[in-house]
Amino acid sequence: MRRHLTRALDRYVLAEFSKIFIVTAVGFPFLLVVTDLAENIEKYLNRHVSTHDIALSYLFWMPDSMFMVLPAAVLFATVFSIGALTRHSEVTAAKASGISFYRLVMPILLGAVFACGLDLALGEVVPITNQRRSELLQEDKAQQGNARYTFAFAAQYGRVYKAYELRVDTGMIRSLQIERKGKGASYPTYILTADTAKYDARRGRWRLGAGVMHVMADSGPSFAISYTGARDRYFTEQPAEMMLKPPDPHNMRYAELTRVIQATERSGSDANLSRVERALKLAVPATCIIIALFGAPLATSTQRGGSAYGVAVSLATTMIFLLLIQLTRAIGGKGVIPPDFAAWVPGILFACIGLVLLVRVRT
């Protein structure tokens, strides 16, 4: 009899949690879509983007908008489901039947674990859907011109291209410098300069004009080699690729970010922001579980003000969480604190508060 009661209660609590979680997880992104559409519809129509493509682009934007919202959805679902059980004395009835508060919230923790897994999956899907959205809204075409002047472009293998002028229509570069940071005798640092470079569309590589290659070894003498023409097998980026802005770390998958971080650090550049974004791909989903531990004991106090109190507590907590994410992203990106740790600061803070509330709750 006791086991049957527990199973029925588990199903009931999980059902209440799931209904609120689904409504919140879909409702919040929908509000973001409406707000963004109202702000940018004129810009999209000026680019002659069809209404079909605009509507489809927002469908592809849903995973990105849901990624940051899921912890908030878990919080709302936890606060309102436990709050309703508390107001209707169902928590008291469960305790009277010998079911502790910790056992009562186990279905909610199970739901939070599911939300965590869903958020991890969304983090890997977001770069793909954002790229498709960018194509539909012609974002790359809007940013792209025909020429670019005095710029640096971070490429693979820790290489950085610096150029005075790039022309897409002719596939020409004037005053090119290629830098690669290395280490050891087998992978030395070098700087390669060329007066010009011409893109060979048939072979997908660049033909370099006259220039000099400076090799700077860690041990042993450095030397320079002059040449009248050369081909660089690693210089395969198309002219149009170098016209675009560097990819946003947020729009890269975890493995891609790892490769970019390694290449950036080999080139001697700062990879702190990329490190923070990579850590957030794990920290934000993990917050779904942490926020459930935080919200469950907090929800027992919502009976004081009813639904309005629950909404106020949930919204305030969500705003604080999002502000902390932005704050720690900026601080970690600047290297004030270790970037891999910065992403976990909001989760750690909420976990500490949640553990204190859990200890103090009456079971």
Image (cartoon, rainbow, N blue to C red):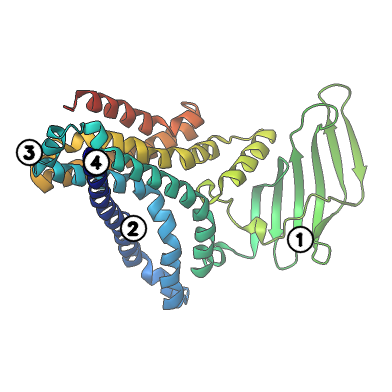
Q: CA distance from mark 1 to mark 4?
A: 73 Å
Mark 3 crowd level (few <14, some 14–19, many ≥20, 10 Å Cα):
few
Q: CA distance from mark 2 to mark 4?
A: 35 Å
Q: CA distance from mark 3 to mark 1?
A: 71 Å
Q: Earlier in the sequence, mark 2 or mark 3?
A: 2
Q: Nearer the viewer, residue 360 or 235?
A: 360
User: Dot 2 lies on which element?
Assistant: helix
User: Dot 4 lies on which element?
Assistant: helix
Residue 309 position in % (x across, y down): 12, 43
User: Do the residues under discs 3 and 1 have CB atoms within 8 angstroms?
Assistant: no
User: Do the residues under discs 2 and 4 have CB atoms within 8 angstroms?
Assistant: no
Quadrant position of residue 39 = bottom left
State which mark lies toward you, 1 or 4.
4
Q: Earlier in the sequence, mark 2 or mark 4?
A: 4
Q: Earlier in the sequence, mark 1 or mark 4?
A: 4
Say which mark, if any, is on residue 75. none
Q: CA distance from mark 2 to mark 1?
A: 44 Å
User: Do the residues under discs 2 and 3 have CB atoms within 8 angstroms?
Assistant: no
At 78% from the left and 51% from the top, the residue drawn is 235
Say which mark, if any, is on residue 29. 2
The vertical placement of 357 against 83, above or below, is above
The vertical placement of 133 against 308, above or below, is below
**Pointer 4: what residue?**
6
Say which mark, if any, is on residue 172. 1
**Pointer 3: what residue?**
304
Residue farthest left in this picture = 304
